[in-house]
Image (tube, rainbow, N blue to C red):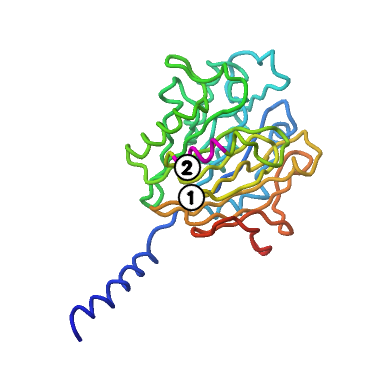
């Protein structure tokens, strides 16, 4: 056989074999987790309950798990007098959280409920339990530093931002706080994460209008700006409901994952959330699948096999309902 013809046959075979063996990193993302000791979820943990018990087998399918930690977890400061709800998680409940999740997003509107010193203590408590925080820090630079996850040799950077009051709790050069969502700053943070070695960047914004099932125009514009700036996916939260989703320039945007562990709601929309499984290779997001969960009267989620969230594979122009068997 002509040697050139042999190469023409073998090169695609080697390429396909290498592609088949390429590592895939699977990360599970969930929305708001609130375990405040004054609320039903915190009281449930204090009484010996495990709010994650019914979903732990599903979450264990991922290589790593990420949640929005919607609370303080320190022991200092006073509740914010200007807010109707201030959340503080006990150390026992924090340990329950850390037994499931390795990464915690802190760019949310309850991270600063007990002030800046308390927030620094929250950062320390999470790290002591082996949980990597992101979206907040002891100063501006740390708050905007991506959390880089190295899974099977794939380096995935997570960036979190708050786009909902109180803005006063945004980090400053010499003050602890959360990362505020500024469009130009986000673009710079994405660029820096990739310059420092990240293969991929996922942005997790805390945004939108509570209880709205459809993302607003600000969310849509900012999400597309993030993709234009180099983000590989945008996965949002905060509205206490799941919101719509789209694919932009071949990259997925999910505007809100909804609640995950939260009590105090009665409407079905508020009691529905998604576990989103994202499969990453070194070129980006290969696929997304979701598992619908329903939240019970104490704020704990359980899987619902009779309902479908969105699924997507690279190359699809839009997301479609997952097969009911998932």
Q: Position of residue 95 (x, y in %)?
A: 57, 35
Q: Residue at x 52, y 48 (%)?
A: 248
The quadrant the C terminus occupies is bottom right
Q: Are marks 2 and 1 in contact (CB under 8 Å)?
A: yes
SS under mark 1 = loop
Mark linked to residue 194: none
Q: Position of residue 162 (x, y in %)?
A: 56, 28
User: What range is drawn magenta here?
Assistant: 221-228
Pointer 2: residues within 10 angstroms few (<14), some, or many (20+)?
A: many
Q: Residue at x 37, y 36 (%)?
A: 191
Query: Image check: 307 left or right of 202?
Result: right
Query: Image check: 69 left or right of 306?
Result: left
Q: Residue at x 52, y 24 (%)?
A: 178
Q: Quadrant of residue 164?
A: top right
Q: Return the residue found at the far right.
A: 266
Mark linked to residue 249: 1
Q: Earlier in the sequence, mark 2 or mark 1?
A: 2
Query: Eyeballing the image, is 130 above or below 254?
Result: above
Pointer 1: residues within 10 angstroms few (<14), some, or many (20+)?
A: few
Q: Residue at x 61, y 42 (%)?
A: 255
Report which residue position mark 2 lands on.
Answer: 227
Q: Position of residue 36 (x, y in %)?
A: 67, 28
Q: Nearer the viewer, residue 65 or 168?
A: 168
């Amino acid at each position: 056989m002509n040697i050139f013809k042999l190469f023409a046959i073998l090169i695609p075979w080697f390429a396909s074999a290498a592609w088949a063996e390429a590592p895939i990193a699977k990360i599970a993302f969930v929305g708001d987790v609130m375990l405040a000791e004054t609320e039903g979820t915190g009281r449930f943990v204090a009484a010996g309950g495990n709010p994650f018990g019914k979903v732990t087998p599903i979450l264990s399918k991922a290589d790593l798990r990420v949640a929005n930690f919607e609370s303080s977890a320190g022991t200092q400061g006073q509740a914010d007098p200007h807010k109707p709800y201030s959340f503080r998680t006990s150390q026992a409940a924090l340990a329950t959280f850390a037994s499931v999740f390795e990464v915690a997003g802190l760019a949310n509107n309850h991270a600063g409920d007990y002030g800046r010193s308390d927030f620094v203590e929250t950062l320390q408590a999470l790290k002591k339990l082996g949980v990597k925080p992101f979206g907040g820090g002891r100063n501006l630079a740390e708050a905007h530093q991506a959390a880089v996850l190295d899974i099977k040799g794939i380096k995935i950077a997570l960036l979190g931002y708050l786009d909902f009051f109180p803005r006063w709790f945004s980090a400053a050069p010499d003050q602890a706080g959360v990362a505020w969502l500024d469009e130009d700053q986000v673009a710079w943070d994405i660029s820096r994460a990739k310059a420092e070695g990240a293969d991929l960047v996922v942005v997790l914004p805390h945004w939108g209008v509570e209880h709205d099932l459809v993302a607003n125009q600000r969310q849509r514009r900012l999400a597309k700006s993030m993709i234009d700036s180099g983000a590989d996916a945008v996965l949002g939260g905060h509205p206490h409901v799941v919101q719509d989703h789209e694919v932009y320039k071949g990259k997925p945007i999910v505007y809100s994952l909804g609640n995950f562990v939260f009590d105090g709601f009665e409407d079905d929309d508020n009691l529905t959330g998604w576990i989103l499984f994202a499969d990453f290779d070194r070129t980006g997001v290969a696929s997304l699948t979701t598992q619908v969960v329903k939240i019970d009267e104490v704020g704990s989620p359980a899987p619902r096999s009779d309902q479908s969230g969105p699924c997507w594979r690279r190359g699809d122009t839009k997301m479609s309902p997952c097969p009911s068997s998932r």
